[in-house]
Image: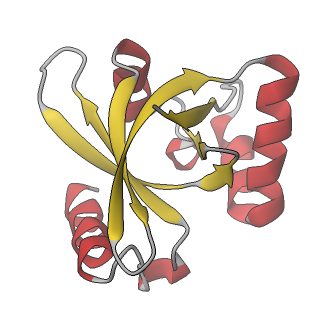
Amino acid sequence: MTSFNDQIIAEFRQNNGVVTANGFGDALILVHHRGAKSGAERVAPLMAIPDGDGWLVAASAAGAPKHPAWFHNLVAGPSTVVESPGAGAVETVPVAASVLEGDERDAAWAKFTSRSPGFAAYEQRAGDRTIPVLLLTRR
C-alpha cells in the first residue's frame, strides 16, 4: 500500500490537490500523523467530505477487520495538519481530530455511503467492526 499511497501523494502535490488515479479528483486530503509508538511522521491520503470549517474522514481501511494505523495515531495525537486542495495551490491547515460518536457518527457515515457505494461495501466487509468517522476541525 505504501507505494500506491506514495504515488497518490506525489500526484496530489504536483497537481494542486487533484488526483486522476482511481477518479479521486479533488476529494482527497493528505492527513499528517505521528506514529503513536514509533513517533515517525507519516502522511495518509484520505477521501474527505467538507464539513463546516473542517473535513470528515472515515477509518474504513477498505473494510479490514482492524482500524487503520492512522486512526490510532490521530486518537493518540489529535493535533496535526492536513494538506487540502486550495485556490490554485495546496493549502496546509492545522486541525484537531475528534472521533464522532452515536448519531453524529451515523449521520457522517451516511454521507460517505451516499457519495460512494464502495463505503457500503467496506462496511459489509468490516463485519462487527464499526467504521469510525473523525471530524478534522481547523485550529
Colour theme:
secondary structure
Q: Residue at x 56, y 22 (%)?
A: 98
Q: Residue at x 55, y 35 (%)?
A: 137
Horizontal side of 129 relative to 71 (left or right) equals right
Q: Residue at x 72, y 43 (%)?
A: 123
Q: Looking at this view, is 84 or 71 the one in front?
A: 84
Q: Residue at x 26, y 47 (%)?
A: 43
The number of numbered badges drawn on the structure is 0
The correct choice, above or below, for 122 with respect to 69 in the image is below
Q: Looking at this view, is 37 or 78 the one in front?
A: 78
Q: Looking at this view, is 25 or 37 the one in front?
A: 25
Horizontal side of 15 relative to 122 (left or right) equals left
Horizontal side of 107 relative to 28 (left or right) equals right
Residue 15 point in image, percent of width and height: 32, 83
Quadrant of the snapshot with the C terminus: top left
The correct choice, above or below, for 79 with respect to 52 in the image is above
